[in-house]
Amino acid sequence: MESKKAYEQLLKISKNKKFEILSDYLKNSKPVKINTTSLNFVPYLVSVVVSQQLSTKAAKTIWSRVMPLISKSTQSKNFRENLRIAGLSGSKATYVIGLLENKELKKMQKEHLIDMPSDEFQKLLLANKGIGPWSVQMARMFFLGDPDILPINDLGIKHAHEHLFGDHVMDENFYEQFSPWRTYLSLIMWNSID
């Protein structure tokens, strides 16, 4: 099982590199799993836009209001206003409408996206307003289930880095040593600050 293997490898790396706080945390934890979404691609991307720059709790609340709106087969003329009432800013409402109207994205199936080279996947997503590098990383992690993504600019990851790795410089080079298990490390890092 991938999660157990990732756990064992991350524990081994943390011991070998003397990352004692991480090592202790792992010893007192269980393997984590990458829970991929059951949503189709466009609704998933909408959920990512909704959650940008929000606490997990606020994002869940707003998503619970937005999801029923986007699941209707036809969008009413008041759709934008309904998104605003649900809690989205004007710009997020615009981004959501753009995603929902994107015919190319609607055609995309998970099987095709998994096989797509990561630079093409990134290019496909970044062509949409409201989708930036963090959103691409979330889609790779939680839509595709890619085991080797670490969203270096995520605020939670930054806080966890300070706690788990102290004075080590936080950059891509530092996290290379955790490849190919960086998604699992990300999940562990987020859990460590909860």
Image: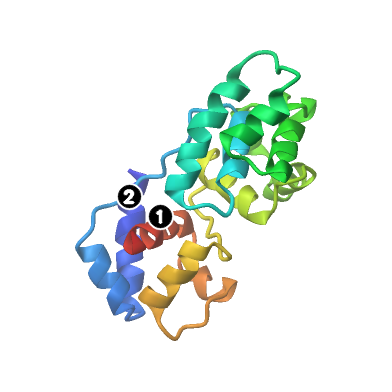
Give the quarter of the figure containing the C terminus: bottom left
Tell me, yes or no, whether the two marked residues, 1 and 2, touch with CB atoms within 8 Å. yes
Residue projecting furthest to the bottom: 167
Mark-to-mark CA distance, 1 and 2? 7 Å
Residue projecting furthest to the top: 73
Q: Is residue 17 above or below residue 74?
A: below
Q: How many marks?
A: 2
Label 2 amino acid?
Val
Q: Looking at the picture, how far across and down is residue 47, in whole percent?
A: 57, 37
Mark 2: few/some/many CA within 10 Å (<14, 14-19, 20+): some
Determine the residue positioned at 55% across, 27% down.
67
Place residue 191 in its image quadrant. Answer: bottom left
Place residue 90 in its image quadrant. Answer: top right
Determine the residue positioned at 70% across, 18% down.
75
Mark 1: few/some/many CA within 10 Å (<14, 14-19, 20+): some
Determine the residue positioned at 47% across, 59% down.
182
Determine the residue positioned at 36% across, 79% down.
17
At mark 1, the secondary structure is helix
Indicate left or right for 163 with 87 as reference. left
Q: Return the residue at label 2.
A: 32
Indicate left or right for 4 with 95 as reference. left
Residue 41 shows in this picture: no
Q: Earlier in the sequence, mark 1 or mark 2?
A: 2
Instruction: Compare residues 5 and 152 and report the one nearer the observer.
Output: 152
Q: Is residue 49 above or below residue 67?
A: below
At mark 2, the secondary structure is loop
Label 1 amino acid?
Leu
Indicate left or right for 190 with 105 as reference. left
Q: Is residue 143 above or below residue 156?
A: above
Q: Return the residue at label 1.
A: 187
Q: Looking at the picture, how far across and down is residue 31, in whole percent?
A: 28, 52
Instruction: Compare residues 176 and 84 and report the one nearer the observer.
Output: 84
